Image (spheres, helix red, strand yellow):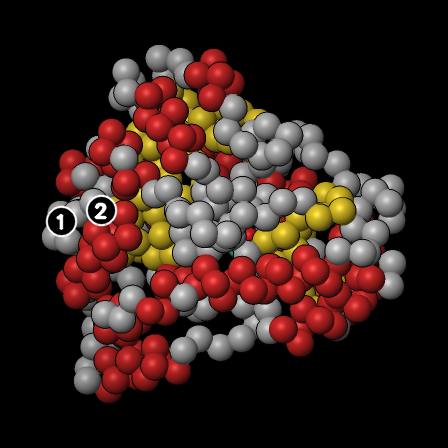
Amino acid sequence: LASRLPQVGTTIFTVMSALAQQHGAINLGQGFPDFSCDPRLIDAVDQAMRQGANQYPPMAGVPALRRAVADKIALLYGHRYDADTEITITAGATQAIFTALLAVVHPGDEVIVLTPCYDSYLPNIALCGGVARTVALTADFRPDFDAIAAAITPRTRALLINSPHNPSGTVWSEDDMRQLDALLAPTDIVLISDEVYEHMVFDGAQHQSASRFPGLAARALVVSSFGKTFHVTGWKVGSVAAPAPLTAEFRKVHQFNVFTVNTPMQHGLAAYLADPQPYLQLPAFYQAKRDRFRTGLANSRFELLPCSGSYFQCVRYNAISDLPDEAFCRWLTESVGVAAIPLSAFEPDARQRGVARFCFAKQDATLDEAITRLRSL
Ligand code: PMP
Ligand code: GLN
């Protein structure tokens, strides 16, 4: 069989989690919390199941959850989406991004992607028959607007951005978003804005959602993930907010892709979202974990790169080893008992050398034990 994805193996997240398990290592590789979600969220799902919310929900998502998402965006970012025509509930952000690409990319269209980038983007574009035009972020992982401008051609259909950024933890500023707005204004390029870490922005900074900027909101599909926000990555529920004409195209694909997303989780999330406190407290919660992890490694031989958002901390390890990053992460897992993700997994051309990514969405005791092991190097 001729492969649709000849260059692709199993995702690095699956590979490193399996290796961590095999060696009993602390898994700071794949991004997921090792602590439970709020029991009130589980109770809300339980209640929905017992009350019979177990059949297909409406195709676009349970109305109460779509309203709750629209309310949250209005509260935080000041843009009011219509819950009926502009919000769709998805099976996590991964499906949201793939469906968005399928909805807008025709074979041969170009999609600009800023690298390093999340590992599903490039295979998704290939599966659409699109052509990925990768544009490197700067050495400190910031957008390079001149390079983005230079990559735009008459065939550019979409631009994919991600802030807070996986893997680097950089966060786009208001000025970045204004520059993006100005750059895209004379074009009809669709913006796909992956904002799954929207509630993990530190040191008092604000998340600059594309929905805050009218010129961007008018062309954007804004992607969120409840898995990240409420510590339930395995539930695979997310959302997409987009103007009605874009949403209509998105839903045409969504209905024949997953059709709908599991019903009781949607009801549970809708009830839980009525209280904004859980997501309003998230920045402080994760900032404390970032600070614990960084303080713990401050005098180690790892060089800590800046982290302004997300739940990832990147480190340079060249004072410890000159192994290539994947080999280093395997060695770290097998011999030191701490799993990490090599940065090259996010870059087809692997420009960054000697950088590994740790996930700090872990219990303090887990972080402390990992710190002890990493400081021994
Ligand atoms: N985008 C980015 C940048 C991510 O880090 C992740 C993480 N898993 C996803 C999308 C996918 O999110 P989900 O688990 O909701 O599919
Ligand atoms: N987004 C998570 C990460 O970057 C993992 C998602 C996955 O395993 N596909 O680690």
Provide the residue designation for mark 2. Answer: 78
| Circle 1/circle 2 CB separation < 8 Å | no
List x then y, in percent, for residue 254.
27, 48
Taking depth in this image into account, of 104 and 362 the one nearest to the observer is 362
Q: Residues within 10 Å of mark 2 (few under 14, many from 20)?
A: few
Q: Quadrant of the N terminus?
A: top right
124 shown above or below 293: above
Asked if ligand 1 lies within 8 A of label 2, the reply is no
Q: Residues within 10 Å of mark 1 (few under 14, many from 20)?
A: some
Q: Quadrant of residue 215?
A: top left
SS at badge 1: loop
**Residue drawn 19% across and 82% down?**
52
Q: Quadrant of residue 238?
A: bottom left
The numbered mark at residue 82 is: 1
List x then y, in percent, for residue 42.
36, 80
SS at badge 2: loop
Q: Quadrant of the C terminus?
A: bottom right
List x then y, in percent, for residue 70.
20, 54
